[in-house]
Image (cartoon, grey):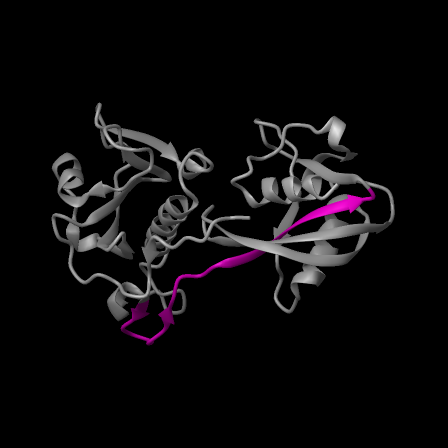
């Protein structure tokens, strides 16, 4: 099971950046981490400021990491990192760092993305301002208030006896086989989403749906709700717009699959361990 992310306290937001605070730094979609420390560990704010001259007025409060105030900063994508920093996307940290640290990076990125995409009111187009110590943005003209949005998704391992259904997504160059997943629609329960997504992606019907666990997924702002389900009827017919190939596999014939740090990898591992 995925570990509990206890090191980042989000019950209180810091008020003002200080030199000894922690800083998560991003250049576009890539996180920048120091080559001198452990992989993925955030910067001391004064160290990051010396490298990139951070605009502290645009600091995004994240919470408290190991008891210290923590902030997220965005710098230009073409900023030179030299020999001090390693640049990589969030997925490159998955499985390489502790779950709590990965989720802290994910929270930092999600809040930066939210701020960047909510500079103007979606209702009237006026500029927004930060309120509630960074927890929300508000429009001064029409009073619309917006909090960070999370998109719920289901991800499901479908089984047929001792076999599991795995699929290769259409359009991905680095090919591996994963469990099926999709976004929830307004008015759906999680179970209804599982049934619809499986039917839409591979054309089969499923039942006996059981909840497994959940995982924050910062690509860019989702929460994955993991389920098991059992085949009931139908033959696999992949939807070519979403699925390149889908097959039933057993333990002896598994294709390349996602890492166990992902909820898909854990669904697969849990299924195999139970057999």
Principal secondary structure, stretch drawn in magenta: strand
User: Residue 1: x, y in percent?
Assistant: 55, 48
Q: Nearer the viewer, residue 228 or 144?
A: 228
Q: Report the residue that reaches farthest toward the top.
A: 83
Asked which quadrant contains residue 209, the reply is: bottom right
All told, the count of numbered labels is 0
Q: Nearer the viewer, residue 95 or 221?
A: 95
Asked which quadrant contains residue 160, the reply is: top right
> Is 50 colored magenta in this rendering?
no
Q: Nearer the viewer, residue 242 or 90?
A: 90
Q: Is residue 259 above or below residue 151?
A: above
Asked which quadrant contains residue 258, the reply is: top right
Q: Nearer the viewer, residue 195 or 158?
A: 158
Q: Is residue 34 above or below residue 133?
A: above
Residue 224 appears in the picture as rendered? no
> Is 152 colored magenta in this rendering?
yes
Q: Residue at (58%, 27%) from the top-left corner?
A: 173
Q: Residue at (77%, 33%) from the top-left corner?
A: 250
The answer to whether 62 appears left or right of 170 in the picture is left
Which segment is the magenta one? 137-161
Instruction: Tell me the quadrant of the picture where the C terminus can be found.
Output: top right
User: Residue 42: x, y in percent?
Assistant: 27, 42
User: Residue 75: x, y in percent?
Assistant: 24, 41
User: Residue 51: x, y in percent?
Assistant: 15, 34
Q: Is residue 93 above or below residue 18?
A: above
Residue 215 appears in the picture as rendered? yes
Q: Residue at (74%, 32%) from the top-left corner?
A: 251
The answer to whether 155 appears left or right of 2 in the picture is right
Q: Report the residue that reaches farthest toward the front.
A: 274
């Amino acid at each position: 099971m995925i570990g509990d992310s206890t090191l980042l306290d989000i019950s209180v937001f810091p008020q003002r950046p200080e030199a000894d605070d922690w800083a998560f730094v991003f250049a576009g979609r890539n996180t920048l981490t120091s080559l001198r420390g452990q992989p993925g560990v955030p910067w001391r704010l004064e160290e990051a400021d010396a490298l990139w001259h951070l605009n502290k007025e645009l600091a995004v409060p994240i919470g408290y990491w190991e008891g210290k105030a923590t902030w997220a900063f965005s710098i230009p994508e073409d900023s030179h990192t030299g020999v001090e920093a390693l640049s990589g996307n969030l997925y490159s940290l998955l499985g390489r760092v502790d779950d709590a640290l990965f989720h802290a990076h994910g929270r930092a990125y999600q809040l930066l993305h939210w701020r960047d995409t909510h500079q103007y009111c979606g209702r009237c187009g006026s500029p927004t301002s930060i309120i509630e110590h960074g927890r929300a943005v508000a429009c001064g003209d029409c009073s619309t208030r917006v909090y960070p949005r999370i998109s719920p998704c289901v991800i499901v391992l479908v089984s047929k006896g001792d076999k599991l259904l795995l699929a290769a997504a259409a359009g991905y160059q680095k090919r591996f086989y994963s469990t099926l997943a999709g976004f929830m629609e307004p008015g759906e329960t999680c179970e209804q989403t599982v049934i619809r997504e499986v039917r839409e992606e591979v054309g089969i019907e499923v039942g006996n749906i059981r909840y497994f666990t959940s995982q924050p997924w910062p690509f860019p702002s989702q929460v994955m709700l993991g389920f098991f389900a059992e085949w009931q009827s139908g033959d696999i017919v992949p939807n070519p717009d979403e699925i390149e190939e889908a097959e039933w596999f057993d333990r002896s014939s598994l294709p390349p699959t996602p890492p166990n740090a992902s909820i898909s990898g854990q669904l697969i591992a849990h299924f195999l361990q139970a057999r």
